[in-house]
Amino acid sequence: MSSVPTTSSSQHEDIEKNLLLPKRIPAERPWAKVCIKIYRADGLPSMSAGIMGGFSKIVGEKKVFIDPYVQVTFSGQQGETSVESNTTEPLWNEQISFIEMFPPLVRKIKVQLLDDANIGDVALATHFIDLKQISDPGRNGFNPTFGPTWVNLYGSPQNSALRDVHKDLNEGLGEGIFYRGRLLMAISVEIFSTIQAAEKKPVEVLKGALSKLKLKKKSKKAKEKTKVSFKEQQQSQAQAGIPEEAEQPSEVTVEVEELHPLPENALGVKEEFLLFASFFEVTMMDPSIGTKPVKFEISIGNYGKAEEVLTKTSKKGEKEERSEEKQPLLEPSSEDELDVEVISPSTTLVQKSVTVNQRPEPTEYDRQCLLQQEHGLEDVEKLLRRPKSKADERLRQVLEEFVAGCRQYSLNADKKPMARPNNLDRCRMKSLPQNIILYAKRGLRIRRRLTRTNVKEKVNEAKTILSKLRFLAKEPQCSIPDILIWMFSNNKRVAYARIPAQNVLYSVVEEEKGKDCAKIQTVFLKVPGSRTSDIFAKLEIYMWLGVIKYVKNSTAELPEEFKPIYEKAQPSTRIPAHLPPSQLNRDDFSYFQLRAHLYQARGILPADENGLSDPFARVVFSTQCQTTTILEETLSPMWNELLLFDQLIVDGKKEDLKTETPIAIINIFDHNKFGSPEFLGRAFATPQVKLVDEPYSKPALQFFDIYKGHRAAGELIAVFELIELDYSGYLEPSVPHDVEPKEPEYLGDPRSGRFIVPEGIRPILKEFRIEILFWGLRDLKRVNLFEVDQPQVIIECAGKKVESEVITSFKENPNFTELVKFVDV
């Protein structure tokens, strides 16, 4: 009888050779040293993990309870910095090194900031660094490298761990909804040429590195780990009988050692930024607010927050806030408007100087190319739904524009100077043009192989390229914090929106401006922590973020009818060279009419027990909303209805309305006789704009996808027109003379006040007869644990139904006696 082998060295070798590795990972991998350098943090929240935090509030003591340290998790191993006591601006200057095989089998590095509390360590914030974003595994790529740069941290709005419903956000579970400070860090990777090279380093070096930190305070977890590892080390030495000096590390290890601090100006010169925002309107507010007053807070970093942020240094910037109260949009007849638009005061932010030229990311011109390709592919998909459409020609045009945009970017990439680039900046500057050229070649290949029969397949290939380009365009080293807009009701935070600062960042070069800088944009507020994409409120807001010397440009793009009102400044406060206005007053109006031609919806979700719905549509535009008629028991409602929104006031410049058109939102509901309507899905539509001095042409119906959350919920066939009214005469504004029809026809009874979709927009229908042969039913499942005894089949098509006869006894005879039925559609 053979004995079981006791040594594990040969077994380990076999296991390593027979590992199931992911695609493109070599079987023989070298060892590497992954170094995470933690320098310092600032702007951290002052909080306590336990009872003492609540007690200090009662007493009124403003003591900082936080003892922060950083924990880095990588490939199943953890490393921790020392603990800095009683500070919100800790200074570590430490390096955590992981010895691991390269390329690693994990994709992310977890960086967590914790508070070393007495009761238990509390997570302050968590950030994940994607190795794929900071490396390029291609032929001419580069190994993971990062920083040194600031990493912004986000999490829960509460500063106490007690009764914090959003504490999971501090653990990195979900999108952070509140700024919780920033961390200065860097990452580098050193690959050893052979396995023996990694094993040359004795354990004494590790011990020496740890001994440097003996004078610094360690967290309780780190103390326990060092005790356990020291005991294991002694036991292994005693069992092996080898002296300590001869032992070599043969597996993954974690080292912690001290670093030299960064030079004063290593990250560039600090600049003072100004955030200017103007709130225009808020609609689609959740009914839970009712008639309660609401207000808004806009913040960037720790500036602009309503509550005081306790830090050891003096806070720079303004903390005051102005709010605006508005009534919610509950009824379709609601037409509340405000003539005076209130502006939140500008907030200043002292931050690292980030001019747009500093990062080698695609400029706004190239982002526009990505958006054009995205919209172009959507157009192709819509054309594919129509018979005899020229989808292949449109796809060919989209691919040509994409290749031209890639070529333009590769030509301009070398012309962009950078101020103080770090290693990742230099590597991305080299690899981005190369990757974009490769994707352009793939686009050319798709175009060459495109035929009328394989359009759908080639659209999917183009979408794959688009998703990869979108991933490339993400900037991994973004040091300006995101802008957070909060909505308050009864002094409670009820909804928020998080906007990347790059979207509203100002640049002197037009192509390098943020896509929403100095534009009136639509922002959808959502409930904190909600997994679905439910809209709590819709906000129209104008934002500008830039270096303070360009303040005079903050209001340059506002429409001419808005006149700024300036407040007199107090003599004690320091004022920028160009003070932004505190309010805007409108003295002129441009009136528009929205024509919502809702023809039909297809494939909507069933809501009733019979597998059908009683759908109606509610269209929301600006501060008005209207509903269609309710059609009973159908999944393809044909409303054939025109909704007129008259004398609308649309904010924004007329010349920008073509490209920055306000969105119309179409909500589909199921009508319930008892109870509130059930939500079935939502679609977004961009109206076609017709100005007074432009000729009129009748629009064609379009397809709009309906979604319920992330789930597809049918499609809508409709078209929307935004027509500028002619108010040159002395009478009320009227529809221009060339618009047809000037007065739409009524749908049914004129007293109902409903209009039909006009001829020329409404499709010409032909009558068809559908014959159905009913043979029988088989293998029917139980319903509510009961067997089906008397089944009936109902077929619905284009709003018309065909009902089969009821089988009197399914068990005895499952076949129909009346075989043929028909319906005219």
Image (cartoon, helix red, strand yellow):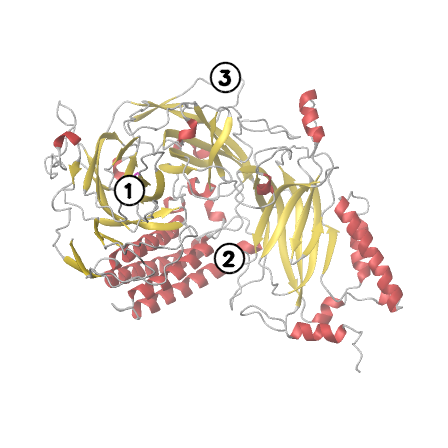
> Tag 2: Cα neighbours inside 10 Å, few (<14), some, or many (≥20)?
many
581 relative to 394, above or below: above
| Figure disc tally | 3
Q: Is residue 429 left or right of residue 679?
A: right
**Sequence-wise first label, 2 or 1:** 2
* Label 1 close to label 3 by CB (< 8 Å): no
Closer to the camera, 706 or 766?
766
Mark nearer the viewer, 1 or 3: 1
116 relative to 335, above or below: below
Q: Quadrant of residue 408?
A: bottom left
Q: Which mark is residue 358?
A: none
Q: Quadrant of residue 155?
A: top right
**Disc 2 from disc 1: Cα separation:** 54 Å
Q: Position of residue 698 (x, y in %)?
A: 15, 45
Q: Secondary structure at mark 3?
A: loop
Q: Quadrant of the N terminus?
A: bottom right
19 relative to 682, above or below: below
Task: Check disc 1 and give the amino acid type.
Answer: Asp
Q: Which residues are magenta?
A: 658-663
Residue receiving disc 1:
614
**Sequence-wise first label, 3 or 2:** 2
Q: Is residue 515 left or right of residue 820?
A: right
Q: Secondary structure at mark 1?
A: loop
Examine the rendering and report whether any part of residue 375 can be seen: yes
Q: Position of residue 11 (x, y in %)?
A: 73, 74
